[in-house]
Amino acid sequence: MKFIADRLLLFGATGDLAKRMLLPSLCALDADDLIDPKLEIVGTARSDFDDQGFRNFAREALEKFLPPERRGSVATFLNRLSYQSLDATQIEGFEQLAAKVGTPERGLAIFLSTAPSLFEPTIRGLRHGGLAGETVRMCLEKPLGTDLASSRVINDAVGTAFPEDRIFRIDHYLGKETVQNLLALRFANIMFEPLWNAAHIDHVQITVAETVGLEGRVGFYDDAGALRDMVQNHMLQLLSLVAMEPPSSFDATAVRDEKVKVLRSLRLVDAGETVTGQYRAGAIAGQAVPGYDDELGKDSNTETFVAIKAHIDNWRWKGVPFYLRTGKRLPKRTTEIIVQFRQVPHSIFAGKGARTKPNRLVIGVQPDENITLSLMAKVPGLDRGGIRLREVPLDIAMANAFAGTQKRIAYERLLLDLIEGDQTLFVRRDEVEAQWDWIDAVRASWTDQGLEPKPYTAGSWGPSAAIALAERDGVTWHE
Ligand code: BG6
């Protein structure tokens, strides 16, 4: 049912995500008059706050995480907020919560960002409190399980109270502007699609590199590791957007139908096609940083780096490897997608001593949003000693091309879509399950092989085996 929610209920309202992302995003939307003046936001968590206590908490978060020029009238925003403390394991508490939420005029959007163990009791409580009717939508934040089986348990539990068209699963990478721009690049230009296949593309690389380490997320990260934390969701979503067939329209069903086909076409990885690593003490930007075990305070076998050579078994991508790598404590923060085209079939310049290099498209997702296409050009001159060709970039820096437009936090977009009920940039259940299916198989292959993470120095590009994974195919990671 299409409705614009006029009530938003945030579970985990005093948590890290609320502090860093959700409250700042909502305040920024408010400052730009993008949310209904009537929208009321109710926060809930275990913490024992009253309304004023929560508003103070929110004010501090905004001061820390939202630049002053984006805050608008903080007082007006804070007035939207109220708070109800809740122990989600105690069903009676949901009656009080429902009373606090009241009766929205149009509808309620619920954002669930809590420990996975609280999902089931929360859903039960919401039903008990009458907070699961037709005009309620449910947004779920990761982690949604640790494997296919546990993700099914969560999805089944949520499914008892909400049908799929009212469930919004977040992958915040889909809220990033350049990620959406990938679709514009592919499907709003004629020149890429005819070349976007195995006949013309040699391989694809997707790198999501971070400089941060554990960031205090001791309990969560050590149980997850890089494969579950980054590859299962963000990297597979990027891969599916690069590889999918053109959807018939930019709507939730058409786009997600195409993505899920890609995810289901992922081939099970062979032994030797993945490398895992864990960082040791080193330095990032000249600053000494401790090793993972030291940050964690105990020995651990969790991977903080993973590189995978993936294959998509369909007509379009037959024989085109997708090299994926992600890691913590790498030399720089960068997310990029590299599409490496093939050589021209025949070089007419070879007899004149010139060498051609294959074209390459680099899509920079962050920190800077840019698109660079490398082209061969003739070096100016009279060519008496032979023709010289050189690679030159055709460069679009989005910040310059769209100077003056507001750069937004990914959650601004996603929260607004949730309030308005557009599921296009949210992950459907069949996608999540296809992602877990493949990830579980990767993990199983690690267990079979007895694969242990290889050490790498913080500030390096991961274990040397990751470099070898690409090099043995004659591929160099783009850096
Ligand atoms: C989260 C992961 O989903 O994404 C974190 O749990 C990671 O470990 C983060 O740091 C990266 O997001 P971004 O937007 O900073 O690239």
Image (cartoon, helix red, strand yellow):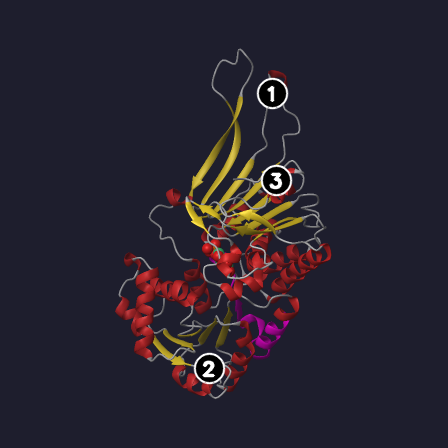
Q: Amino acid at mark 2?
A: Asp
Labels 3 & 2 near each other (Cβ < 8 A): no
- Residue 401 lies, in percent from the top left, at 39, 43
> Which of pointers 2 and 1 lies earlier in the amino acid sequence?
2
What secondary structure predominates along the stretch shown in magenta?
helix
Gap in angstroms between the C-alphas marked 3 and 2: 55 Å
53 horizontally vs 308: left or right = left
- Residue 219 lies, in percent from the top left, at 52, 66
Check disc 3: other Cα within 10 Å, few if <14, some if 14-19, many if 20+: few
Q: Amino acid at mark 1?
A: Phe
- Residue 195 is tagged as 3
**What residue do we see at 35% from left, 53% from top?**
406
Please identify, in this view, whether the residue under mark 3 or under mark 2 is nearer the observer. Answer: 2
Please identify, in this view, whether the residue under mark 1 or under mark 3 is nearer the observer. Answer: 1
**What residue do we see at 55% from left, 37% from top?**
360
Viewer-proximal residue among 45 and 133: 45
Residue position for label 1:
349
Above or below, comparing residue 40 to residue 435 in the picture: below
Gap in angstroms between the C-alphas marked 1 and 3: 22 Å
Q: Amino acid at mark 3?
A: Leu
Asked which secondary structure carries label 3, the reply is: helix
Asked which secondary structure carries label 2, the reply is: loop
Q: Is mark 3 within 8 Å of ligand 1?
A: no
- Residue 384 is tagged as none
Residue 142 visible (yes or no):
no
> Which of pointers 1 and 3 lies earlier in the amino acid sequence?
3
- Residue 322 lies, in percent from the top left, at 63, 46
Please identify, in this view, whether the residue under mark 2 or under mark 1 is nearer the observer. Answer: 2
Which segment is the magenta one?
152-175
